């Protein structure tokens, strides 16, 4: 006894005859996904990149001694949220962290042909953070005298 494959026709899908199915191939629209941009220094050092971490993360509220696990969960949740806003193209948090680490270990050439050194950018972020932190502790009169 021979096994025959079931025959599918356009009528099964509400299309009518077989001739209609052959026309569908010509009318089919190719859907292409947008290509994910590469994680670069430009993305990491823009205003919502590492600058946002330096600006916003000191505002996180931690419970302190005896609650280290809960504090770590708060910190990791903040990192995940920041990274999802910065680079929403990949789902796996750990994969993006490793990619960012890899990107920050190498110098890159920008579109203008200049060399982008991540160590220099990170140094400038630290400098700005410490400068702002030092000025925050002074009153406005003292800050004016120091600026002169």
Image (cartoon, rainbow, N blue to C red):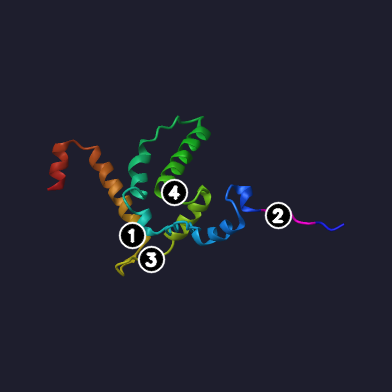
Residues 18 and 115: in front is: 18
- Give the residue pinned by disc 3: 108
Task: Answer whether labels 4 and 2 touch (C-beta < 8 Å).
Answer: no
Q: Position of residue 51 (x, y in %)?
A: 33, 48
Looking at the picture, does residue 110 appear above or below residue 13? below
Q: Position of residue 148 (x, y in %)?
A: 12, 48
- Give the residue pinned by disc 1: 120
**Upstream in the sequence, badge 4 or badge 1?**
4
**Upstream in the sequence, badge 2 or badge 3?**
2
- Give the residue pinned by disc 2: 7
Looking at the rendered image, the quarter that the N terminus falls into is bottom right
Q: Which residues are magenta?
A: 4-8
Mark 3 secondary-structure assignment: strand
Q: Nearer the viewer, mark 2 or mark 3?
A: 2
**Upstream in the sequence, badge 3 or badge 1?**
3
Q: Position of residue 37 (x, y in %)?
A: 42, 58
Mark 2 secondary-structure assignment: loop
Rounded to the nearest whole Å, what is the CA distance between mark 3 and mark 4? Answer: 22 Å
Task: Answer whether labels 3 and 1 touch (C-beta < 8 Å).
Answer: no
Q: Residues within 10 Å of mark 1 (few under 14, many from 20)?
A: few
Rounded to the nearest whole Å, what is the CA distance between mark 2 and mark 3? Answer: 57 Å
Looking at the picture, does residue 59 appear above or below residue 32? above
**Upstream in the sequence, badge 2 or badge 1?**
2
Q: Position of residue 56 (x, y in %)?
A: 35, 40
Rounded to the nearest whole Å, what is the CA distance between mark 3 and mark 1? Answer: 12 Å
Residues 99 and 55: in front is: 99
- Give the residue pinned by disc 4: 88
Q: Residues within 10 Å of mark 3 (few under 14, many from 20)?
A: some
């Amino acid at each position: 006894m021979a096994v025959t494959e079931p025959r599918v026709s356009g009528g099964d899908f509400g299309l009518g005859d077989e001739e209609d199915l052959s026309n569908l191939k010509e009318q089919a629209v190719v859907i292409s996904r947008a290509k994910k941009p590469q994680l670069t220094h430009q993305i990491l050092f823009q205003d919502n990149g590492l600058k946002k971490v330096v600006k916003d993360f000191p505002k996180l509220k931690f419970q302190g001694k005896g609650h280290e696990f809960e504090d770590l969960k708060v910190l990791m949740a903040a990192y995940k949220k920041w990274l999802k806003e910065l680079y929403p193209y990949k789902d796996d948090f750990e994969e993006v962290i490793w990619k960012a680490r890899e990107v920050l270990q190498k110098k890159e050439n920008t579109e203008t042909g200049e060399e982008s050194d991540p160590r220099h950018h990170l140094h400038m972020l630290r400098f700005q953070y410490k400068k702002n932190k030092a000025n925050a502790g002074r009153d406005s009169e003292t800050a004016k005298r120091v600026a002169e």
